[in-house]
């Protein structure tokens, strides 16, 4: 059996920093409220002419360099995004072209909102088991601020833009040890952009297709679902809490992250936190955090890591891996 192993990581953040102090001038909020309720101090905002596939390309090139592979070695591209450049082609195809890959490998997008990256890893991992994939690029990339209503204090303080990427390579041992995915569409109204191509298209044309959220309901569900999934991940894989070196969580809210870490019995020194500087970058948040901790040396080869994500749908999931 062939396994998938992370051979390299990369990330990219747009240059523009949006601070809580600036948000205080835009909506009725305070730095103190935002920090105490979310842990967020600042976030990045893509330039008007920066598109998701461009962010993805910059993160992907870093991951390729760390893995020591060239674009032509990539036989599969899976991009997790909720904010693609266009309706179609997929960001996967646009990224493939940007990287100059024309070897006929598959390229596509996965949309599972903030759980997108764990969904994308799950999908890519299966190609190693069943389809002989040798070298895959898995990316989470978002220009999420494009679907933010800057007059809505409930949401505009939370989100940011960015991209993160991993190169997965075939290996004799995992690698990706286990993945667990869940969804329940019953909750679609609690967190969504209620417009698209076949519903409320006028909102898109008028540039008013924005994220709507019932924050406290989402909060409760996220804490419950993520607590349950880390327990499920350990129980079903036969690993104990003491076997886990790092939690690399989706970065939505420091209070949700703390609750999940507590469930795992991990101290916050074993949790990679970027939410203070990145805000919630949706599908990009997990690979952005992973890359930061790999590059600063916290995450070492052989470490056991749990990735977890939760988002609109609801969709949620986890990945247990040996780095
Ligand atoms: N500044 C100041 N006050 C704000 C505010 C802001 N930016 N946003 C909301 N408020 C107000 C609300 O209007 C409410 O006022 P009211 O009591 O007078 O009605 C009050 O703060 C409390 O709101 P509530 O929603 O109960 O706060 P909370 O403790 O749940 O925190 C969130 C709000 C959004 C930070 C929190 O619910 C959250 O993080 N939810 C999950 C969001 C998330 O992770 N989404 C993405 C999932 S991937």
Image (cartoon, grey):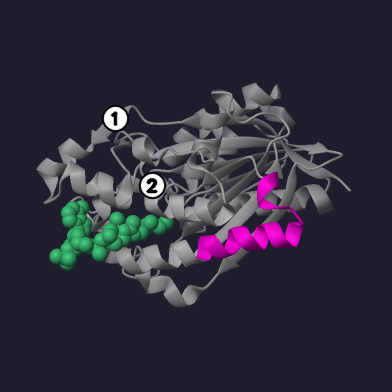
Is residue 249 shown left or right of residue 162? right
Closer to the camera, 43 or 204? Answer: 43
**In the depicted structure, whether residue 235 falls above or below residue 170:** below
Closer to the camera, 260 or 118? Answer: 260
Which quadrant contains ligand 1?
A: bottom left
Task: Look at mark 1 in the image and give the residue it sits on.
Answer: 16
Task: Look at mark 2 in the image and give the residue it sits on.
Answer: 280
Residue 109 visible in the current orientation? no
Answer with the quarter of the image where residue 49 lies: top left
Residue 145 lies in magenta, yes or no? no
User: Residue 289, how many percent across, how many down?
Assistant: 50, 37
User: Residue 101, how many percent across, how many down?
Assistant: 65, 32
Q: Nearer the viewer, mark 2 or mark 1?
A: 2
Q: Earlier in the sequence, mark 2 or mark 1?
A: 1
Q: Residues within 10 Å of mark 1 (few under 14, many from 20)?
A: few
Mark 2 lies within 8 Å of ligand 1 (Cβ measured): yes
Residue drawn 34% across the image and 63% down it? 193
Span shown in magenta: 225-243
Q: Residues within 10 Å of mark 2 (few under 14, many from 20)?
A: many
């Amino acid at each position: 059996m062939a396994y998938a192993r992370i051979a390299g990581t990369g990330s990219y953040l747009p240059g523009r920093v949006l601070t809580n102090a600036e948000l205080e001038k835009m909506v009725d909020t305070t730095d103190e409220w935002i920090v105490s309720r979310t842990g967020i101090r600042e976030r990045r905002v893509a330039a008007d002419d920066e598109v998701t596939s461009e962010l993805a390309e910059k993160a992907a090139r870093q991951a390729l360099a760390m893995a020591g592979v060239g674009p032509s070695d990539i036989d599969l591209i899976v991009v997790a995004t909720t904010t693609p450049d266009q309706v179609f082609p997929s960001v996967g195809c646009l990224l493939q072209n940007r990287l100059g890959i024309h070897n006929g490998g598959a390229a596509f997008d996965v949309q599972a909102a903030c759980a997108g990256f764990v969904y994308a890893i799950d999908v890519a991992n299966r190609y190693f088991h069943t389809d002989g994939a040798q070298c895959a690029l898995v990316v989470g990339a978002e220009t999420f601020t494009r679907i933010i209503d800057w007059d809505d204090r409930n949401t505009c303080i939370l989100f940011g833009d960015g991209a993160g990427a991993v190169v997965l390579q075939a290996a004799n041992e995992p690698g990706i040890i286990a993945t667990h995915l869940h969804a329940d569409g019953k909750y679609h109204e609690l967190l969504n952009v209620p417009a698209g191509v076949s519903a409320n298209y006028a909102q898109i044309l008028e540039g008013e297709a924005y994220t709507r959220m019932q924050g406290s309901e989402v909060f409760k569900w996220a804490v419950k679902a993520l607590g349950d999934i880390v327990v499920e991940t350990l129980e079903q894989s036969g690993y104990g809490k003491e076997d886990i070196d790092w939690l690399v969580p989706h970065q939505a809210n420091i209070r949700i992250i703390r609750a999940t870490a507590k469930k795992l019995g991990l101290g916050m020194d074993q949790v990679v936190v970027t939410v203070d500087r990145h805000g919630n970058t949706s599908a990009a948040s997990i690979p952005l955090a992973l890359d930061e901790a790999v590059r600063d040396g916290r995450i070492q080869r052989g470490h056991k890591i749990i990735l977890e994500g939760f988002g609109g749908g609801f969709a949620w999931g986890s990945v247990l891996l040996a780095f």
